[in-house]
Image: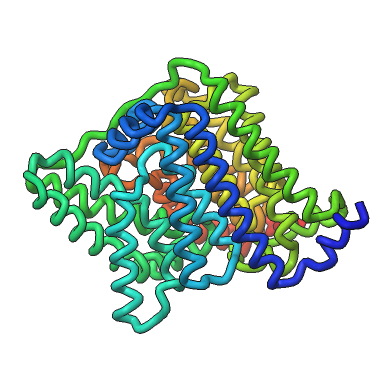
Amino acid sequence: MKNISLIKKNDTEEWVQQQGYLFLFCLSVCFIGISLAISSPKEMATGLKSILFSPAVLLTDYSVVGCNGSAFFNSGFLMLFCTSLLKIHQRKFCEEMISAVFALGGYAFFGKNIYCLLPIMLGTFLYAKIRREPFSKYILVGCFGGALSPVIGHVSFSLGIEAPYNIMLAYLLGAMIGFVLPPLTTHFFHFHKGKSLYSVGFASGIVGIILLNIFKVFSVEPTANPITLVADSRFFQLCMLAVLSLILIVGLIIEGFDLSEIKKFSRENGHRLTNQLTHCGFGMILLNMAFVGFLLVGVLAVMNIPINGILFGTIMAVVGYSARGMNVKSIVPILLGASLILFLVPDYSVNRIEVIMALLFSIGLSPITTNHGCIWGFVAGMFHLIVAPAICGFHGGLSLYNSGLASGLIAGFLSPLIELAQQKNIVRKSPLE
């Protein structure tokens, strides 16, 4: 125990940089290891081929398109690719990096793959070169920008264009997307004033809406894939618990099994994206991620909702976002508000996966709870579950961050109402303490 305590005392910036990268590398390798353990090389090759050549319009379950092993390999490989790219370009380890890698790993179960991600990364690289700024500054935007991977898949495999022209056109469009995302993300951030954690998701959704209508003009628009939960999957449930347990154990070891400072994390404001490592430490961030993940798994268990590949990826992505200020205290009111709508609306069924995903992703609005209190968090959760399941029709499944667009719209809609209510003392300002 004495040696474990020394880890926490020597929690220097250099140590955090080393251990942060090591954690992400190890997690990536673990996912690849799982894939190799559960699938034969032949199954893996066939599954990966199906994944890479799939249009992957929202929603597409890669564990069904390929197999469980190929889905895990795709996830682990993308996380490894992103982490390696960040390390090569010497990006300083930060909370947003955790979110980006986890988002890649999560969405790799239903839409992201290396073929579709590369042109978007190329676009952000070109943007950095034109701006004469280091590429490391925009790598994370490129990773999050993989939300528009279905655009590349759709142009490549759904329009009937012969090779190699389909690839050339898809990669040109992908590079253009990657090029415009950095300035658009910065601009649209002011719309919701940081009240949503899904900034790139909102920008991606707007781009998706524009592209859908361009496709409609030429009568080549995609069709969203309806998916329902039809069977339980103990495999994904056990894998999710194993991943969360690993995160929890690593966090406990780093903190020397001391949870006395856990309240410090709950006092951090969710709209500040780069303060968690400084104020709370890497170990506390991991513990918070594990707590949020276990809470979401518990919510699904109470509702008797099975975890399939898509919901596994959803929880992965949300757990990553919790590194940026989201915590159990700030998300409970949002989950309660969203759950109320789930049970009140007759058309909403626990078998509609887009509804369950909206429920889980609703907690990206946690900055509203943190800064304005539980009442507004509850209201935000209600609005999110009303809007998010229907908003896919606006971008036709071309953006994987469906809730990113919804939460940005809701945050932008509620912000002036919250300010007005607090100015008139209709609802007193009561941020979480």
* Residue sitting farthest toward the front: 41
Q: Position of residue 87 (x, y in %)?
A: 51, 66
The color scheme shown is rainbow
Left or right: 268, with 114 as reference point: right
Q: Residue at x 18, y 60 (%)?
A: 172
Residue 140 occupies which quadrant of the picture? bottom left
Residue 138 occupies which quadrant of the picture? bottom left
Residue 331 occupies which quadrant of the picture? top right
186 relative to 391, above or below: below
* Residue sitting farthest toward the top: 231
Q: Residue at x 18, y 53 (%)?
A: 170
Tell me, yes or no, if residue 347 can be seen here: yes
* Residue sitting farthest toward the bottom: 132
Q: Residue at x 30, y 65 (%)?
A: 122
Q: How many marks?
A: 0
Q: Residue at x 59, y 66 (%)?
A: 93
Q: Position of residue 134 (x, y in %)?
A: 42, 78
Q: Position of residue 196 (x, y in %)?
A: 51, 56
In this view, the residue in front, 208 or 367, is 208
Tell me, yes or no, if residue 372 can be seen here: no
Left or right: 159, with 394 as reference point: left
Left or right: 59, with 313 as reference point: left
* Residue sitting farthest toward the right: 2
123 relative to 75, above or below: below
25 relative to 391, above or below: below
224 relative to 417, above or below: above
Left or right: 116, with 310 as reference point: left
Q: Quadrant of the C terminus?
A: bottom right
